[in-house]
């Protein structure tokens, strides 16, 4: 996948405000962005998407400005990705590690210690098992 844009298409930075219809959700994801009812969002879109936004009655579009077509620094992008990954790992560690996998036993049964098992047997049966009087014939 390349970062090149189609010929004849320029990127525009524009302020867009979403106006939710009555009874509809106050948050919407459209055109690759998340919009909140009544809150202006600065987005970068191509001319085609800008036209769609302008023609949609639920969006108010401000004045657009051209975006410099210079590519971002790959080293800066890599450093930002690594920082985000470290932050995610720190959050995961603070939450107690990754979630259990499907089918994992969450509460493993702990077998009693051998001495405790012997104590239980002698408490229930005395020194040894003896046949009850009612079962003798």
Image (tube, rainbow, N blue to C red):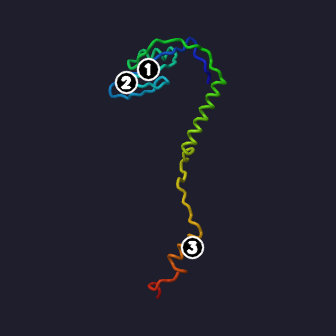
Where is residue 66 shown, x and y percent of the image?
Answer: 54, 11
The picture quadrant where one finds residue 110 is bottom right
Query: Camera-side residue: 110 or 87?
Result: 87
> From mark 1 to mark 2, how far is it between C-alphas?
13 Å
Q: Please, what secondary structure does the residue beneath circle 1 have?
A: strand
The answer to which of marks 1 and 3 sits earlier in the sequence is 1
Discs 1, 2 touching: Cβ within 8 Å: no
In this picture, is 25 found above or below 72? below
Q: Which quadrant, please, contains the N terminus?
A: top right
Residue located at (48% from left, 24% from top)? 33
The numbered disc on residue 17 is none
The answer to which of marks 1 and 2 sits earlier in the sequence is 2
Residue beneath label 2, please?
Answer: 20
- Outermost residue, right direction? 75
In this picture, is 63 found above or below 116? above
Q: Please, what secondary structure does the residue beneath circle 3 have?
A: helix
In the image, which is nearer the foreground, mark 3 or mark 2? Answer: 3
> From mark 1 to mark 3, how far is it between C-alphas?
72 Å
Where is residue 22 shown, x and y percent of the image?
Answer: 32, 25
The numbered disc on residue 40 is 1
Where is residue 47 shown, x and y percent of the image?
Answer: 50, 14
Residue beneath label 3, please?
Answer: 118
Pointer 3 local density, CA inside 10 Å: few below 14, some 14–19, many at least 20: few
> From mark 3 to mark 2, how far is it between C-alphas?
71 Å
């Amino acid at each position: 996948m390349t970062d090149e844009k189609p010929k004849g298409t320029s990127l525009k930075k524009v302020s867009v405000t979403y106006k939710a219809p009555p009874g509809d959700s106050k948050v919407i994801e459209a055109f690759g962005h998340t919009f909140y009812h009544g809150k202006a969002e600065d987005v970068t879109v191509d001319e085609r998407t800008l036209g769609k936004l302008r023609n949609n009655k639920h969006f108010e579009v401000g004045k657009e400005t051209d975006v410099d077509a210079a590519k971002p620094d790959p080293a800066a992008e890599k450093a930002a990705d690594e920082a985000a990954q470290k932050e995610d790992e720190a959050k995961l560690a603070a939450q107690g590690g990754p979630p259990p996998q499907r089918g994992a036993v969450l509460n493993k049964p702990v077998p009693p210690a051998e001495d405790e098992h012997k104590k239980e047997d002698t408490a229930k049966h005395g020194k040894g098992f003896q046949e009850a009087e009612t079962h003798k014939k």
